[in-house]
Amino acid sequence: MKEKLFLCISICCLYITESLGLSKDELLCNAGDNKHLCLPKDYNKFDLPLSSQPNMIDIGIDITDVLRINDKEYGVEFSSYFNVMWIEPRLYIPQSYIDEMNREDRGGVGDAMIPVNLELVNLLWLPNIFIYNLKTFKVVEVLSKHAGLWITKNNEVMYSQATHINFICPMRFDAFPLDTQICKFQVGSYSYDMTKMIFHQSHKVQGYVKTTHSVVLDYAVNVERLEPSDLVLDYGELGNFSVAGFKMTLHRHVSHYLITYYLPSGLFVVVSWISFVVPPDVIPGRMALLVTLFLVLVNIFNTVTSNTPKAEGLTAIECWMLSCILFVFGALVEYAIILMQKQKEAHSGHTTRHNNQVKIVCKENFKYEVASTENSTNDVSYHHQEPEIEPEPCGPNFVKVDRFFLVMMPILFLVFNCVYWLSFGAHFFWMQTNSTDQD
């Protein structure tokens, strides 16, 4: 069916029918025998074709490609052939048309269509189509609009246009970039409820077409039929309105974000644990390592926030970056506390012995007595407190503190990863698996 439709579009401009070149008056039926396609003279384009029963409107959207998905403007743009088919019993079809359609209808199902003069659209009744959440609807033009009109022997009229459609998709980015968006494209009537007009999709105009996308997008796109609950919209006193369309599921590609943000920031946290094996006395090296990692993570976080779509709270990647910054900041605070304790220990070791001023200082993490005589302030001597035994450690054992955090930090980071990926990643991978099973 799709190939037949595309073939008709390609030969429409070359196809010569009896109605080509006919004026508006000639498209109206005469009292006698009519040999060309025409409408009754009392035909009113504002009256419904069927007044005693609902008019069946067949909608088809043949998607050729998804062109753009804009997260910041909540827009999805795609190119398609927008097809609408309905029954027009007031249209007179001459026998010559019917014979030609019988020759085309090789399968004997009555679906053969022949193109007719597009000017007939100006005289026909057209469904008042309404597309929900529509932003723009552009008909492709070269020398003229890419549109065509076809009829069948069952008085079915199909009007098709080559279009670029941009519609609003209400997206939520709380789980960005592990998010999955569901966009519903719904087509219905602007003013007629289900008692007057019913929209549906059949094989005649092809409800939707899954194509190989040639445009590189941030999402994997999957087009499906609407759920039965989405085919009827309740508008209270206005009535129930019938709609047709499709559901577009957008699965974001995560590999780019894993390589660009997740992996480097996670490695920076791991590198910060090296500071726990650096002796506390090596202040420049340990401080330079932690401060550099902290500033690099802050810079990555600023980049993430500038490129992340807006959400009600923090997105998943922002939570990850903040957690990585807190882990490095925790290592920095731990070292700051050690330095404060060392400084406090150094200032608390003042005693007086005989006439000499004796001060206990820390050197290589052990206590030493530093004595200075009154005759020479530069004469400084180090004495162990207990020469006959091993020197007493200086203050708390900071090596044990570092070893404790060297074990606890990886455990906490592992727990955080389990909670994070189970919270944000489980739903994402479930959606990916479910989409693969449906395909």
Image (cartoon, grey):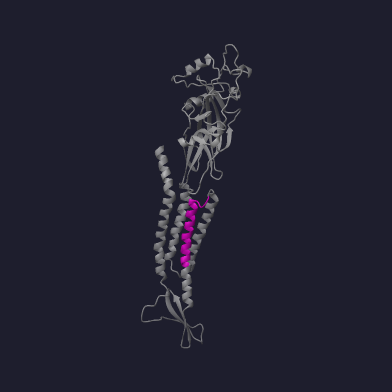
Q: How many marks?
A: 0
Front position in the image: 202 or 342: 202
Front position in the image: 266 or 1: 1
Q: Position of residue 333 (x, y in %)?
A: 48, 65
Which residue is at the far bottom? 355
Q: Position of residue 218 (x, y in %)?
A: 50, 43
The residue at the point 44 percent across, 56 percent down is 267
Which residue is at the far left? 389
Q: Is residue 224 visible?
A: no
Magenta residues, dominant SS class: helix
The residue at the point 49 percent across, 55 percent down is 321
Q: Is residue 232 visible?
A: yes
* Magenta residues (range): 312-335
- The reply to whether the magenta stretch includes residue 322 is yes
- The reply to whether the magenta stretch includes residue 54 is no
Image quarter hosting the C terminus: top left
Vertical position of residue 395 compared to residue 209: above or below:
below
Front position in the image: 170 or 331: 170
Vertical position of residue 392 compared to residue 409: above or below:
below
Vertical position of residue 81 compared to residue 73: above or below:
above
Q: Position of residue 66 (x, y in %)?
A: 51, 37
Q: Quadrant of residue 163?
A: top right
Q: Position of residue 75 (x, y in %)?
A: 55, 41
The residue at the point 49 percent across, 18 percent down is 101
Which residue is at the far top? 32
